[in-house]
């Protein structure tokens, strides 16, 4: 049982590091009011920690709860371990989608754009499929883009495309994202109601 005691005690040590890191994450996310899933993950880490500490003590010959069998502990850790993994995978999927965008065909992206912008029929399909003239960021990078690219880069479309009612129809501000030297940057690009390019502003760091 000596080997098992060391292994489980080391595991409890790693969980302590996990708890400290999760505290940092919760603090960061609280400012954005997005902390709830990580509070649940932190509770699960607490649960694992007590399970590990309990087992380490049992291996070392100190049994606090004789009524609870090793099998029960293993089953509980297995079950909540899978809950932990699923929750973490959901969170990471959403996080990566926000950073790198979502996979979507041009057709799906254009359909999403039309649904969001509520444009009527006076925008023809070629305008929607157009790859606009490339833009140059201050960093020197040349970026090509289409409406579909903007839609894919922003799972929450209202963060990527801002609509403004103007005299001739709706004007658009598109936030064109690219990976720059100092991180991800977005260039606000203005397009008119015919989706023609009008102007751009300096990029901003995300
Ligand atoms: Zn750049």
Image: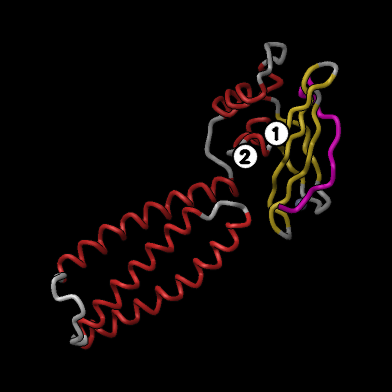
Question: Between 121 and 29, which is closer to the camera in this rendering?
Answer: 29
Q: Residue at x 66, y 35 (%)?
A: 158
| Residue 161: mark | 1
- Quadrant, the N terminus: bottom left
Q: Using the rendered view, name the quadrant where residue 132 is placed.
A: top right
Left or right relative to 15: residue 5: left
Residue count near mark 1 (Cα–Cα under 10 Å), binned few <14, some 14–19, many ≥20: many
Residue count near mark 2 (Cα–Cα under 10 Å), binned few <14, some 14–19, many ≥20: many
User: Disc 1 beta carbon < 8 A from ligand 1?
Assistant: no
Cα distance in 3D space between marks 2 and 1? 9 Å
**Could you say where residue 84 lies in the image, as x and y percent from the top left?**
36, 57
**Could you say where residue 82 lies in the image, as x and y percent from the top left?**
31, 56
| Residue 200: mark | none
Left or right relative to 197: residue 44: left
**Could you say where residue 147 lies in the image, as x and y percent from the top left?**
67, 30
Question: Between 65 and 87, which is closer to the camera in this rendering?
Answer: 65
Magenta segment includes 164: no
Circles 2, 1 touching at the beta carbon (< 8 Å) = yes
Q: Residue at x 47, y 59 (%)?
A: 39
Vertical relation: 205 (above or below) 128 = below
The residues colored magenta run 193-206
* Tag 1 secondary structure: strand
**Could you say where residue 89 lies in the image, as x and y percent from the top left?**
42, 52
Identify the residue under disc 2. 154
Question: Between 202 and 132, which is closer to the camera in this rendering?
Answer: 202
């Amino acid at each position: 049982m000596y080997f098992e005691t060391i292994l489980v005690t080391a595991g409890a040590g790693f969980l302590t590091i996990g708890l400290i890191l999760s505290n940092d994450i919760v603090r960061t996310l609280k400012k954005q009011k997005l902390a709830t899933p990580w509070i649940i993950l932190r509770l699960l880490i607490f649960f694992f920690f007590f399970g590990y500490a309990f087992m380490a003590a049992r291996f070392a010959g100190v049994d606090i709860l004789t009524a609870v069998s090793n099998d029960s502990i293993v089953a509980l850790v297995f079950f909540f371990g899978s809950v932990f993994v699923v929750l973490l995978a959901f969170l990471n999927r959403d996080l990566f989608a926000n950073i790198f965008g979502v996979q979507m065909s041009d057709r799906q992206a254009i359909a999403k754009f039309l649904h969001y912008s509520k444009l009527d029929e006076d925008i023809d399909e070629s305008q929607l499929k157009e790859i606009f003239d490339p833009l140059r960021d201050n960093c020197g990078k040349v970026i090509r883009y289409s409406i579909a690219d903007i839609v894919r880069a922003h799972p929450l479309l209202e963060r990527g495309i801002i609509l403004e009612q103007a005299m001739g129809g709706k004007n658009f501000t598109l936030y064109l994202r690219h990976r720059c030297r100092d991180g991800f940057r977005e260039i606000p690009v203005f397009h008119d109601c015919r989706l023609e390019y009008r102007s751009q502003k300096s990029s901003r760091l995300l």
